[in-house]
Amino acid sequence: MIRLTRFNGSVFVLNCELIETVEATPDTVISTIHGKKYTCLESVDRVIDEIVEYKGKIRLAGRLHQ
């Protein structure tokens, strides 16, 4: 799950496993595999960084439990 910010300043959490595309239109629009679209303040690069960080934490947690 990654934290993102709506244009009104509220924070929401998105399951990054469901993300299909992230594009700048110029706003950042995230499309899920279910066809839902989310617009956020974070840049495309920031969204990618959040996903990489999240997946790194998952991998690390998996190694610690082996």
Image: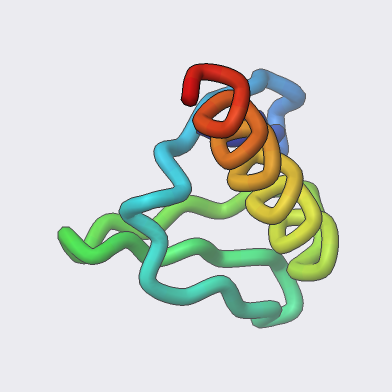
Percent of width and height locating residue 61: 58, 25
Residue 32 visible in the picture: yes
Percent of width and height locating residue 41: 77, 48
Taking depth in this image into account, of 48 and 53 the one nearest to the observer is: 53
Taking depth in this image into account, of 44 and 38 the one nearest to the observer is: 44
Residue 6 visible in the picture: no
Q: Residue furthest left?
A: 34
22 in relation to 66, above or below: below
Q: Residue furthest front?
A: 66
Image point (40%, 60%), residue name: 19
Taking depth in this image into account, of 6 and 1 the one nearest to the observer is: 1
Taking depth in this image into account, of 17 and 40 the one nearest to the observer is: 17
Relative to 10, 39 lies left or right: left
Percent of width and height locating residue 28: 67, 65
Relative to 47, 29 lies left or right: left
Image point (65%, 21%), residue name: 11
Image point (80%, 56%), residue name: 49
Corner quadrant of residue 9: top right
Colour approach in the figure: rainbow
Relative to 33, 28 lies left or right: right
